[in-house]
Amino acid sequence: MHAQVTHCDRIPVMARIAPLSGFPEWLPEGRVVETHIVDALRRTFELHGFAGIETRAVEPLDQLLRKGETSKEVYVLSRLQADDDGASGGRAEKSADKQLGLHFDLTVPFARYVLENAGKLAFPFKRYQIQKVWRGERPQEGRFREFVQADIDVVGAGDLPYHFEVELPLVMAEALGSLQAIGVPPVKILVNNRKVAEGFYRGIGLTDIEGTLRCIDKLDKIGASEVTQLLLDEVGATFDQAVACLELAKISGSDATVIEAVRALAKSQGIRVSPDAADAAVDDVAGNQAGALLATGLAELEALITAASVRAPGVVVADLKIARGLDYYTGSVYETVLVGHEQLGSICSGGRYDTLASDGKNTYPGVGLSVGVSRLVARLLSAGLVTASRDVPTAVLVAVNTEEDRARSDAIAAALRVRGIPTDVAPKAAKFGKQIQYADRRSIPYVWFPGSLDDDGTPKPDQVKDIRSGDQTDADASTWTPPAEDLAPQVTPAK
Amino acid sequence: MHAQVTHCDRIPVMARIAPLSGFPEWLPEGRVVETHIVDALRRTFELHGFAGIETRAVEPLDQLLRKGETSKEVYVLSRLQADDDGASGGRAEKSADKQLGLHFDLTVPFARYVLENAGKLAFPFKRYQIQKVWRGERPQEGRFREFVQADIDVVGAGDLPYHFEVELPLVMAEALGSLQAIGVPPVKILVNNRKVAEGFYRGIGLTDIEGTLRCIDKLDKIGASEVTQLLLDEVGATFDQAVACLELAKISGSDATVIEAVRALAKSQGIRVSPDAADAAVDDVAGNQAGALLATGLAELEALITAASVRAPGVVVADLKIARGLDYYTGSVYETVLVGHEQLGSICSGGRYDTLASDGKNTYPGVGLSVGVSRLVARLLSAGLVTASRDVPTAVLVAVNTEEDRARSDAIAAALRVRGIPTDVAPKAAKFGKQIQYADRRSIPYVWFPGSLDDDGTPKPDQVKDIRSGDQTDADASTWTPPAEDLAPQVTPAK
């Protein structure tokens, strides 16, 4: 199909129209679902006192490249030069302007926003942020180049109490749980604590903690024997050390037995799990520090699963294999799976950073999670889990008797809208059958017929027809109201 | 200030943090105002039956460059290559991937969306779209490089009745008018019709219609004598022709006298304003065609101002100098000024395109308008016209007696939230004075005190304090409700 988008014949013919891989777009019905989800998340975030912010889409490139691993993913911007003919395009900016790239997450821009506005924000600062992000990755199922994230974070000035590490996944449990009403599967939030992992790894004599986390992070993808090999090859683990790491990663559960299992494993590895490193025998300072770190981590993890078992029973599961390999978390870490869709990967991840941001003098610790909204919506639509009752907001279509009489239909529509009833007016004074068809194609539930005039000019009453049931009754636009569930498109579980 | 955003010591020190010119960001209070405005626009658009869509942020570069004049404004994307060390950045994409740029408006992507999904959309298709757009222009007051637009358009398949050209500016009048409640000045929507301008220009013998429109478009910026000179120099007008163009541009008003004034001017220029070109004397076909076009345009313009004077009295003004010089409109054109802030320029513009999109076989005419949300918000904030009662959603802060007793405060907060009351819990069990200060700094109106326990363990009743009045009363979290106006931040005219 050759196509033309613009509006005068100086304009050349347009190239073939085809979707761009990795840049999802929804038809209006899909957008109704996405909007419903975003509105529901926002409602829960606001109920918990999170303030909404938005940051610009771009950051200076040097900011975006600080996490070495992500550099390949950044889209860099350049302006077409004034002296460019516009045909070749894409030349890098030659001016002294700072190079800019599109943000690939909402954490880096939020950290910059906090530093830039630190004097004007009240800490602890709780914010939510729902925006698009871009990554130049190869597109594949569940991975997009442009997608919407919905983040919540709390950031403190100087310190941030541990209880926020309990609070934030519970806010997400509530937000995502509220979506079950529309057919979103229940979620499981898998939690771990970096202090547990680091304490354990150090306790068994490993020193490359990040390397070990990166290996463990691959467990679901490549399996235990490959991870064992990686641990031997990449972090210099002995076979026994590798086996111990895998034993730790096997532990999961939603009550205190998890803590006991980790303690028992640590003990079997000769780690002294003590809450007090000062207790350390002088001949094993490192080992005792590791044990103290492990003890702290276990106490935190226990506090989290204990609170969660009361406030969101069955949702939060301690899972010691959760590593979040590429991120620089320092405490709790979180991943979230849709029950029954675990192979989709995590739809909501995050954790605690002791240094979300720092200006050298002040440090801003933070904890937060990020929902992959597009990944979630894409799965809901492709798996047919969720459906919208209609793809327009319209509850009522007002028919038009004749074009000369359109003003009367407009006045009826205005009377309905002023009372909050989304109303459209038929585009043409066609036969009523065609006008009803206009409503039917859009699943607009009601068609309103302005009363015709008697021979003496007296108007007959208006009538409204429920085109689903065929019921038609007299109605007055200043008082008639549809049932609440017909006012807006209903998003519900698909049958 | 040297600053560091990320989280491990492999990361280099961050460059100086400074705002990027042309990329506006709001503090939380400004964001409350922006969100309120976007929600209000969306509500009105949905009441009128417009379906919300979003398109991806990028389009193939060849699409974006079809309007010659805008090529300088496009931001082109390139991915950092895998073989790039990440330090130099900004190299243009070498792969066969189609070059991509960020959209500079929402019309080009919407036209592409319509073509791409034509088989799945129901026409006429009414959509709204509220998204960021990017232009690599030099930033100046009211002109940004990244900004939010809120568009409504109706697009037909094959045809689109004229009445939509009346409907759409009235929807915008209602949407923008609803913002007066929060202190946004009233708007004037200035309308014109391309057929009037083209019919008149052709009628006086000019043939470079686009060139003439571009000159007239500069009237407010450079004044009448400079425009006269431009018309002589750039479109080859005679002095008399230039004067006639300026006479036309002087005409404005909100009732039928405008139509009469144009007719009289046309007559004085020897143009036969006839609704029927077939009437044409054989010796003056071009002249009569011009007169017929002028007659059609005047009939349309009259229909618009007549309907507007009934449905939005005082808002819509016919203004014959409105040219929209750079756009390829074919019928009605619209600009909108904030009364008292006319020098800000138009905050909402648009018009009718006979060919919004075309695939060669099918043509999709459209009419729409676009609100410059960021320009509006920036002015409201910088001129101090609008204020938000608080910059957090929180209505109630629940105090914490002791850290051991935090669970009780959490349970109170949960009981309030479940009834839709946005609630936060104090971050620390500090002295009550400090906890009240936490609420006060954020203008949270209520602080909730969990009842302390008697010596025998019996809890005393909870109390809630309105920190504005100091009133403190017993309260039960399962029944207490604040007045509706305290539930969410109120956005109101600034004093």
Image: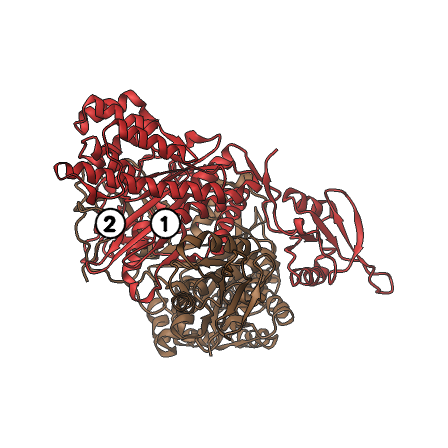
Chain colours: A brown, B red
- Chain ID for label 2? A
Q: Is residue B383 above or below residue A397?
A: above
Which residue is at a point 46% across and 58% down the rendered structure image?
A: A424
Label 2 CA crowd tier, 10 Å (few <14, some 14–19, many 20+): many
Identified at 24% across, 34% down, the residue is B272
Going from the N terminus, do you reach mark 1 or mark 2 first?
2
The C terminus of chain B appears in which quarter of the rendering? top right
- Secondary structure type for disc 2: loop
Label 2 belongs to which residue? Answer: A6
Looking at the picture, how far across and down is residue A265, in whole percent? 53, 76
Looking at the image, the residue that sits furthest to the front is: A456
In the displayed structure, A71 sits above or below A19; it is above
- From the viewer's perspective, tell me whether residue A165 is left or right of residue A434: right
| Residue named by callout 1 | A64
Location of residue A467 with respect to B391 vertically, above or below: below
Quadrant of the frame with the N terminus of chain B: top left
Mark 1, residues whose alpha carbon is within 10 Å: few (<14), some, or many (≥20)?
many
Q: Amino acid at mark 1?
A: Leu
Judging depth in this view, the residue of B39 and A256 nearest the camera is: B39
**Residue B437 locus on image (x, y percent):** 69, 43
Q: Marks 1 and 2: which is nearer the front?
A: 2
Query: Left or right: where does residue B228 sit relative to residue B255?
Result: left
Residue most extreme to the left: B283
Examine the rendered structure and indicate whether residue A493 appears above or below residue A36.
below
Task: Tell me which residue sits at (60%, 66%) in the image.
Answer: A304
Please provide percent x and percent y for residue B492.
59, 41
Q: Which three-letter amino acid code belongs to the residue tagged 2?
A: Thr
* Along the line of sight, the residue nearer the viewer: A418 or A485: A418
Label 1: chain letter: A
Proximity of marks 1 and 2: CB atoms separated by less than 8 Å:
no
Disc sitting over residue A97 in the figure: none
